[in-house]
Amino acid sequence: MADTESRLGDDDQLLAALTEKQRSLVRRMERLQAMARADAETISRAIIAADQAAVVEAVAPLPAGRRSDVGSALYTVVPSTGLDSEQTAAFAIARLGTATEAWDMASSLASLLAVPATEAPPAVLDLFRARGRRWTDSVVRGLFRPDWYRGEVWRAVAALVQADLADEPDSPAWATWSLHAYPWEDLPGRVRSDPQLARSLRHAFDVPGAGLVLSVCASTQRPESLVEALTGGTDEGRADVLDALIGTLGNPFTENDLRGWKEFAGWLAPTDDELAGHAASVVALLAAPSRVSVGWAQAALARDGVRCDAESLVDVSDAVLARPDKGLVRAQLRLLQRRYAEGDLAADSLVRVLAQGLDPDRPDLARATAAVLREALPAAGPEARRDVVAVIDARFSGTGDALRTELGLPAGASAAVAEPIAPPTPVDLPRAGAVESVRDVDELVDLLARIPVGDSAPEDLERALDGLVRFRPEDARTLTALTHTFHPDQPTLTAPDWTMAASFVDLVRAWLGVPVGAAVDGVRRRGGSIDRPEDAPPGAAVAPEPWASGTLTWREPSWVPPMLTYRRMVELRAVVGSGALLLSTPTSSDGSIDGEALVRRLAQAPESGARWAPHDVGTALLRLEPSTRAELEAVGALSLHELVSASTADALRTLGVEDRWVRETMDRPFTHYAPAGRVTGWFVPGSARGAPDDPVLGWLDTSTVRTGWHDHFSVVDWHDARWGAGPRHWATVLVHDPDLLGAHLLPLLSMYADRPRADLLPVLRALGSSRAPLHGPASAALVRLAAFRDVTVRTGAAEALAGAARSGRLDADVLGEELLALLVPDADGVADDLPPKLNRLVETLTDAARIDDHAEAAVLGALRVLMTGAHRLRGSADAVELTAQLAERRGIGVELPEGLAAVAASRSSSHLAVAARRLAATVR
Amino acid sequence: MANSVDVLYRYARPSQGRISDGATSVELTTTDTTVFLDAHAERSDVVAAGLLAVGHLPGTRFYVPPGSFQRLQASDPIVTADPDALRFESLSACCGVTARLDVLPSGLDISRARHGTTNVDINPALRRLLAQVRKGDPMRLSVADEGLDVRTLDGHAHERKVSLPQRWVRSLAELQVLLAQLSLVAEVDTMGLRAFVRSLPRSTPAQAVFWVQPLRSGLRLGSSPAPGSVAVGGPERIRVLESVLRHATGLRVYGQVGDAAATSCWVVDLPHSRLSVSLSPQTTRGFSGEGALLEDLVDANPDALEAAHGRRGFDVAEQRYFDRVLPFGRDVLSEHPRLARAQRLVLDGAVVADGADHSVRTSGGRHLVRRGADGAERCTCTWYAKHGSGRGPCAHVLAVRLADRRTDG
């Protein structure tokens, strides 16, 4: 009691301190609360008396502004337990009448119309009647959000419509919801008593989304009830519904939506006679946009008792045979073959439509098509036969004669086989474009504003870094323009600590004078109950995590690529706005530095006694072409020992050396988010130990690929579509050693291949236009990238392969070895447990081969190596098929390796065996 | 729905069709009261397939903005009868794809025709019928309301109320400017077209841009610009052409050769007709936001004011404009939002000259508009940082231009 009095005393003091206007407001609020409480008490008495009419009488006149207060007060005066069902219903009406949000209203309606459903209680209708049309319309609009399904709401609104209190909603959801409005009930009975429901159900055939609802219905409604409700249980009704169903399947709805309708078709189970009565519509469905619909139509037409107009079937077959879905094409061929065998189809028209389906890019389908053609050709007229020959001559190179012979057609003018092509000798690629310095603060501001929000070229980051060091943000306008973008609370720019995006934003903030967090130089490790315990290194700061008993964390020094790029940004924080000269700014857009330019920069030495900043000088040296560096050293223009330590200088001399790489399949470290497994990486045995602030040693220490496998990508900003910003920057630092880039990329590429969006095109461009040859690590990276889920990455990988092949930097045998190593288990059965997806790889290789002759030759060369392990590789038939196709095109015989030869010699008719035989035929 | 206007499509009766004795009759009803066309189609199967493609598009949405709860209702296709072609046009629900079927005079044996534009009803029943039309079937095509008096039907009139987004009209308005900037970049034959459409991915990241590169063997979708390539965002949208592939005799690609994402137009040649599908630069971008008309609107160009109401179209195949008198009043379209915002800034005195530059005060801070050596204005706002000048000037640049004009005036 003393406490309460004391608090009251405080309140009095507080009131005394208020101005008169504030006191007036407080009094007004108190008055309103008192009124709300009085209203709530009146309503409460009606609820306790279970008098719904009295509740409506009390609630209906409440002005909109007071409903929320009264609603809140209701909860304080109505007992929360012990209400019987009548009182609960009265309470729900009161809640409906005081609710201001659509969700609250829906919730109240749901409790009023709980399953088993009842009609809307008259009191509910009275409430809507009393409130008037405007309120009712707004409630109905709020309730009918298409993404927000509630069957009870449909029933409530239907009651309002029936009572002529609201218009029937014109939203498509009105029809789709009706399918699920009476779960677990006698739907046919409902339809018989409610013509409006019948209308809505039938309307569902025309609106998107209803198929999805149907899929859900199967769990709450017996399919036969739904069918009876829709058909009325009559033959006419069934005919109408089948007609509507076929129409629906022809609509451009989503595949999932149409799958629901296909399921419904299964429930309807039309008889052969019924389907025959709709044969014309079913045939027309073969030209529908969705594969689901086409598949259903094919299945219907394949039934014994279903006959259709043969001419229509042939007419529409052209559309099916051109489809990308191979299964549908095969099914159509079977359908045509059967109808021809039954004597329904004219040979001439069949032959003509089949000829159009002969596509050299789809050899497996061309073969299946040829099999049907072979049956029809003998009966075809001379003109139709000539048409077939013309198509073969125009489209098939190399295999045209064989195909004609197979079909029993006379020889014709076969398209020429591609000229043999020698692998290109490495050519001196043109230099990448020059990097232009930022001219003034205004241009820098434009650049800074652009980098965090969208795509920018890799060199833009370097230009921005150079500008941040050379210019001061002394202009207040600059601050104004950028502060908003780089404000610490800007949510779009929040990213994990060490990503390029986050470290760049911190750097700009430092330039603007905005405080930034302290820098770190190591990675955080955890050990304990979840992760496999690891020993913290000596001297590491170990701290228990208060929220996870038994778990310890510590930081340890790290020089994985993300840390190195982060530390470079941290180093720059000290010199932003100083007007200092940066050594590391590239002179070419690929990231390289011209030797003369570097020598000129070095001539402007920092103040006596000072040394160049380690990341700046180290990055500059990595960007200098090794041969140029050697020349400059030879003529005394560059002295590594004056710039870096002896060990760093020694390590730098290994940059770009070819024969230092070793591939190894190793155990991947276990973490709670990535189970243990076997992964393939590339290493340089005996590479010098790195350091966080020595980029040369850090980048060249490939042991981090093993020890810091997860660190290589755990700091990539995977929350952000721009997570490729880091790797794209790596590519501009390791411009002269694509293999070192590949080795550091592999952990990331093996783990992130299935991300839907990967911003790795600049990395691919760097690999594809590399001036240095691509060996194992870089080729392995290309193989991984070629199997990414993101189609932009796969397309870029095809171009990178073609680009490197064209410039003579890609060795087909090396690429083949990487395909083999990553895809096929070795003799001991040891395999990478994150192999690239073979189907995507084959797609990318097919795409690359189309780009030009050099790419085609390189892809064929790589595939020939892969063929040695193809028999041990699941799903390799497409790869063998592609090899055969390219070999035929190029007129090159490919000897089958032992394993594949055995498959070809077997009696198997599998896709692989057929493809292997086709490949074997290239030798003949 | 904000920024939309309720349009009541009121047809005398639903469009309908009949197939009897192998002859097809398609009666497209309109919201107008006169006969637009009465003709026989030379290739009924081609017209039917084209109408299906155009009729399907309004119900298709290639991009749903995150957090969007509203499902925009499909607007009906429009038909324009002019002496050079009978043009059926429609726009996807996301306003990023348009399809236009031009039935050429050679494909129609015309009994009656009247120049003009109106809505047509392509309903599910009619779509079902169109799907069954076969090659060689004679087809009578009428576009009219058959003189029926709507009032006498007493509620049986075929009505559909649609919240037509202003974006719809604005998209048509922008499209003619964008199309007029395109040139022919590639042509492929039937096989090349089929192979290309088949090679298209089923989905791509929403903001990804690809480049269609002409190769010796047809077209290829590339990830970077190559000589003669044309940018295309959301290439899966080209699949709209699938429904007419079996009739196609070739494909012409119109675009802008260059590095930036841009509008492209895909014209499939069909017997006696052609289907043109125009794609916005990215899936996330509707035509309405491209800002192609803004420059002319600031200059108060009378042609631009007319075009802003969607009353002009451009035929890339023939490289000429055509009139499209939309069956809506001019009042359905409010001022362009960016232009309106610029005008508000000027009226509020937010534009202040700062030496050679201008400072524009907004609720989100102050932005600087500078004129570069090339004469182009640059702004420090995030919109400009994101889009540059590729989608027309930002509101601040527009405000500066309007303020300059005021001063000069």
Image: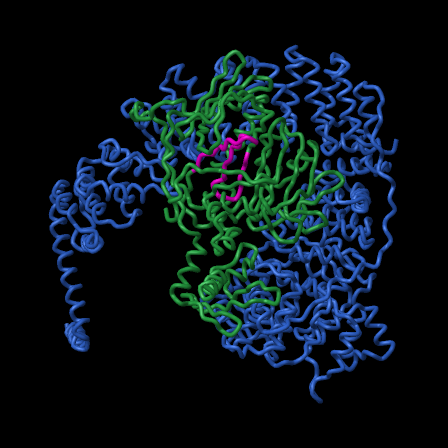
Say above or below: B266 vs A815. above
Q: Is residue B368 visible?
A: yes
For residue A463, side relative to residue A264 (left or right): right
Pick whichever, A34 or A558, lies toward us: A34
Q: In the rendering, at what x and y percent does residue A632 appear?
A: 83, 75
Pick whichever, A172 or A888, lies toward us: A172
- In percent of the image, x 66 and y 22: which residue is there? A333
On the image, which quarter does residue B180 sit in? Answer: top right
> Does the magenta portion include B159?
no
Q: In the rendering, at what x and y percent does residue B350 appear?
A: 42, 67
Give the total number of marks visible in the rendering: 0
Pick whichever, A243 or A395, lies toward us: A395
Task: Specify start and end residues of the magenta stretch as a single range.
Answer: B74-100
In the image, which lettered chain appears green?
A: B
Q: In the rendering, at what x and y percent does residue A271 appear?
A: 48, 15
On the image, which quarter does residue A325 sit in? Answer: top right
